[in-house]
Amino acid sequence: MLYNVLNSHFSDKIIVLFASIFAFVVTFALLAKPFGFLPRDGGKFVVDAKGNKVEVNAASNGKVTGVGLIMILVWLFSVVLFLPLDFNLQKDYVIYLVLAFCMMITGYLDDAAKAPWGELIKGMLDLILAVVAALVFVKFNDTNVVFFGNHFHIPVAIYVILAVALIWASVNVTNCTDGVDGLCGTVSVIELFAFSAIFGNNTFMSKYSALGVVLAFVLVAYLAYNWNPSSVLMGDAGSRTIGFFLALLAMKSGHPFAFLLLSFVFIFDGGLGLVKLAILRVFKVNLFKNIRFPFHDHLKKNKGWKIYSIVIFFAIIQIIMSVITGVIIHVCGR
C-alpha cells in the first residue's frame, strides 16, 4: 500500500528496512502487555499409555502463550503495508502469505485448546497445507534444482512429493525445537538472515528474502520477552509458521537441499526425536535410549546445562552451518 509512494523516493532495500523497523516496534509494543484473550500455558494434559493424565509443560505454567498469533499478524500486515503486492503478477506470492496465515491459525487453535490436539489432527492439517503449497509452487515455478553447482530437473510429480515432505518436516522439527526460552527464535533469526545473505541477490528470490528479513525483526522483538526467564511463548502459532516459511525459502532459492545445512540445528534437535519415535512405533526398537529428545531437553535435564548455555551453543552451530552453506554456494555456484 505504501510501496508505490515510497518507491519514488527510496530504494527497495531502504523500504525493506522501513518495514522491518515498523514490524519490530509494533511487535515489541504489543508483546509488552499481551492481549487478555491469549491462552495461558499449563493446565494441559495428555494421556499416557497407561491411561494416566500427564501434565504438559509444567515449567511454563501460567505464561502467556500463542503470541505467535500477534507476531505473524504483525509480520503479514507489515509486508502488505510496505512491500509491493500485485495479485495479478504475484499470485503464488499472495497464496503463500495466505497459507502462512492458515498455518498460524491452526497452530493458535492448538495453543488455545484446553487439551493439546492429537498427533493425527495436527499431522493431517500440516499435510493438507503442505500439499497445497507444493501444488502452488509447481504451478508457478519450474522444478529445476541446484546441488553443489550441478543443475538437475526433477519431474513434477516427484518434486511435489519431496516438497510436501520438506514442508511437513520443517514445520515439525521447528515446532519440536521450541521448548527452551529463546532457542527457536534465536536459531530462526540466524537462519532467516543467512537465507537473505546467501540468496538475496537473486532477483527471483529477493522478494522472499525481504519477507524473511521482516520476519527476523519480528522475532528479535519477541526475543526481548522470550529470553530466559521468558514472559511470553510463541506457541505453535509461531513455530509452525516459521517452519513453513523456512521450507518455502529453501524451495524458492532453487537450492532446496541447502535446507539440510541451514536447518541443521532444527533437524538435529527436533528431527532426531521424530525419527526415534517413528522407529520405536514401527519397529519397536528404542534407538538412543540414553539420550532424551528434543536434544535440548537432554542437555538441560540430563547434563544440567543452563538455558542460556543451550541457546548460545545451538546459535554458534547455526552460525557455523550458515557460513559453511554460504561458502559452498559461493564456490560451487548458483
Image (spheres, grey):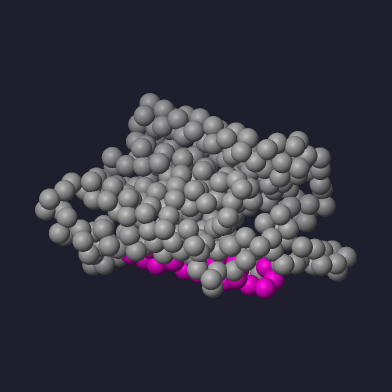
User: Outermost residue, right direction?
Assistant: 50
Q: Mark yes or no: residue 152 visible.
A: no
**Placement of 219 over or under 78, stated as above or below:** above
Q: Quadrant of the N terminus?
A: bottom left
Q: Mark yes or no: residue 221 visible.
A: yes
The quadrant where residue 47 appears:
bottom right
Residue in the picture at 55% in, 33% down: 317
| 37 to the left or right of 305 | left
User: Outermost residue, left direction?
Assistant: 8
Residue in the picture at 76% in, 42% down: 301
Q: Quadrant of the C terminus?
A: top left
Most foreground residue, 209 or 233 = 233
Magenta includes 310? Answer: no
**Placement of 62 over or under 14, stated as above or below:** below
Magenta includes 112? Answer: yes
| 235 to the left or right of 195 | right
The quadrant where residue 57 appears:
bottom right
Characterize the magenta stretch by its predominant secondary structure.
Answer: helix
Residue 311 percent across, percent down from the top left = 59, 39
Residue 118 percent across, percent down from the top left = 69, 68
Most foreground residue, 159 or 134 = 134
| 302 to the left or right of 60 | right
Residue 45 percent across, percent down from the top left = 75, 67
Residue 112 percent across, percent down from the top left = 60, 71
Start-end of magenta stretch: 94-116
**Placement of 221 over or under 96, stated as above or below:** above
Most foreground residue, 317 or 226 = 226
Residue in the picture at 26% in, 57% down: 83
